[in-house]
Image: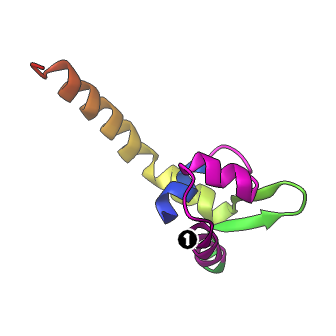
């Protein structure tokens, strides 16, 4: 769930409720546990009045994995285009 939370926060701040909805109604307990871990790791921060957002370190993390995401998108499209079903 940690990576999913980071993914959902990549472009915006989200409240706990919005983040839970974005994470397919993940268990509130699990979500809060992961958010606490991510905050302790310095990847996520709580912005007063805005909800959770990526910290500078969290933004750097997503930028680092951007090329991998683009590769996965391209690879996935080739797999779908090449399927026979």
Q: Start and end of the magenta stretch?
A: 10-39
On the image, the x and y values in percent for residue 30 come to: 55, 71
Q: Going 59% across and 78% down the picture, which residue do you hit?
A: 37
Residue 27 falls left or right of residue 17: left
Q: Is residue 18 above or below residue 32?
A: above
Disc 1 target residue: 30
The residue lying toward the viewer, choosing from 1 and 25, is: 25
Location of residue 75 by image quarter: top left
The residue lying toward the viewer, choosing from 15 and 63, is: 15
Does the magenta-highlighted stretch encompass residue 17? yes
Residue 8 falls left or right of residue 67: right
Q: Does the image show residue 9?
A: no
Q: Residue furthest right?
A: 49
Q: Is residue 31 above or below residue 26?
A: below
SS for tag 1? helix
Q: Going 68% across and 61% down the picture, which residue do you hit?
A: 56
Q: Going 60% across and 46% down the picture, which residue do you hit?
A: 22
Q: Is residue 15 above or below residue 73?
A: below
Q: Tell me if mark 1 has few (under 14), some (14-19) or many (20+) residues whose alpha carbon lies within 10 angstroms of its own.
A: few
The residue lying toward the viewer, choosing from 68 and 20, is: 20
Q: Residue furthest bottom?
A: 40
On the image, the x and y values in percent for residue 81 come to: 20, 19
Residue 53 falls left or right of residue 8: right
Does the magenta-highlighted stretch encompass residue 2? no
Q: Residue furthest left?
A: 84
On the image, the x and y values in percent for residue 10 come to: 61, 48
On the image, the x and y values in percent for residue 80 come to: 22, 24
């Amino acid at each position: 769930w940690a990576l999913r939370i980071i993914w959902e926060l990549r472009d915006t701040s989200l409240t706990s409720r919005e983040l839970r909805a974005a994470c397919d109604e993940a268990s509130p307990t699990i979500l809060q546990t992961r958010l606490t871990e991510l905050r302790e790791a310095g990847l996520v921060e709580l912005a007063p009045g805005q909800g959770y957002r990526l910290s500078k370190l969290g933004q750097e993390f997503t930028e680092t994995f951007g090329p991998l995401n683009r590769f996965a998108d391209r690879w996935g499209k080739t797999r779908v285009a090449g399927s026979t079903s």
